[in-house]
Amino acid sequence: MALFTAGYAAPYLLPTVVGRLDAHLPLSPAQAGLAGSALLLGSAAAGFTLASRLPRRGPRPLARLGLLLAVIGYGSAAASTLLPLVVAGAVVGGFGSGTATAVAAAGIAGHRDPHRTSALGLLSVSATAGALYLTLPRLGGGHGLPFAALALVAAAAWPATGRLGGPARAERAVRASGRLPYPRAGVVLAGGLMLWSLAQNALWGVSGRIGAEQAGLSEVTLGVVFAAALGAGLLGVTAASALGARLGRAVPIGAGTALIACCVVAASCARGLGGFAAGEILWNALYPVVLSYVIGLAAALDPRGRWAVLAGSASSLGVACGPVTGSLLAEAAGFPGMGLVLAGLLLAVAGPMTAVALHAGGRPLTPGSVRRRGGAPAAVVAAGAGAPSGAVPRVGSPELEVAQIPVRRLRPVRRAPLRVLLLSPASARELVRGRRRS
């Protein structure tokens, strides 16, 4: 949870990072969005780089490396006023955040209940970001405060890395590694999640400008609105954790994405405090709910966490392209036109992601599927909310996934042939006479 919070804090603080870069450095809005995209591109690059190396290196060394890079990078960006150093520090810090996120994603996928674990991680991130949105406007101006906050969050997560596994555990993980299961479904999910995240963060990256320029709100009022929106996200994730997999994954992902598209249009067209706050709060209440189900779906595709890391990296790539995309769309078509384009993109990706949830999110256990996977069912792991204590879940229900472990074929045991001794007729008559006498 600590690594998840340290890794996801940068995307959550993106509006204030981009806004302060625009206000306090010689950058245009599009250039500030590009700097924010560079930070998140570093995060995406870390995930793609480490997806295949996590089992070999072990979680503890990589987690500590990521946190160290985040502290150094964000700390340098906060302490410097030279634009090249600020951008370079943001990229290095983003790589560190992506490393922490990759380790956390692999750990969540290996957990007994990945959906609930990811929901708890999103609760932690939302609470941390909400507290920072309430605190940072009252500490003064300058571009360095958001970067300093990200560095402090990464430093606070360092003690938790002592509970992670080391290289000895990693060697066993290498021996257990194999091919990626569900390759087509995983690629579709990763591509859809990239576009889904791009649309979300295109609006999130310019939300501060919408509130300030179109709705006429001050920075303090914007901070309160964003904190309230993240608080609504806490309530949404709590409800999703309680609901679990009762509705499966397809309904929350498909219907939730359609509702988010409506909220994007409402927030981008708002001209006052009421409309802007309503759109942002409802949108932020739905966004982490759908994201928790998507993370759980990616974790269920591969219990070793490789699809979770790759899907998270694709999401980071979409997040990275979000700020510059939102800035360019806002300059070309205005805030309302940008909202309509992003809503259409969300509706376009809702179908494929829902299809993946229906196709691979809860496949029933059949002998044919076991033979195709080349393994034997070693454990049935809850990928949704899990089963109540003492209850046995129904095989094939959406909350179940099968962890496949290759089984070594054993040589058949040769048994001696069964020999039956038959009595001769004379011996049989003597045996009967003896029984009658007794």
Image: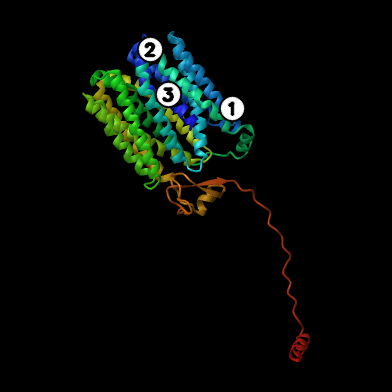
Q: What is the crowding at mark 2: few (fewer than 14 residues within 10 Å), some, or many (at least 20)?
A: some
Q: Tag 1: residue type?
A: Pro
Is residue 275 depicted above or below 29 in this figure?
below
Q: Is residue 428 visible?
A: yes
Q: From the viewer's perspective, is 242 left or right of 52?
A: left
Q: Residue 363's mark?
A: none
Q: What is the crowding at mark 1: few (fewer than 14 residues within 10 Å), some, or many (at least 20)?
A: some
Q: Earlier in the sequence, mark 1 or mark 3?
A: 3
Residue farthest along the left direction in this orientation: 271
Q: Secondary structure at mark 1?
A: helix
* Scheme by which the image is coloured: rainbow
Rendered residue at 36%/47% (across/down): 247
Q: Earlier in the sequence, mark 1 or mark 2?
A: 1
Q: Residue 142's mark?
A: 2
Residue 268 rendering spot, x and y as whole percentages: 26, 26
Q: Between residues 237 and 34, which one lies in front from this camera angle? A: 237
Q: From the viewer's perspective, is 21 left or right of 393?
A: left
Rendered residue at 45%/54% (across/down): 394
In 3D space, how far apart are the residues under numbered discs 1 and 3 (Cα atoms)? 21 Å
Is residue 324 depicted above or below 391 in this figure?
above
Q: Quadrant of residue 31?
A: top left
Rendered residue at 57%/33% (across/down): 163
Quarter holding the C terminus is bottom right
In 3D space, how far apart are the residues under numbered discs 3 and 2 (Cα atoms)? 17 Å
Q: Residue 10's mark?
A: 3
Q: Residue 61's mark?
A: 1
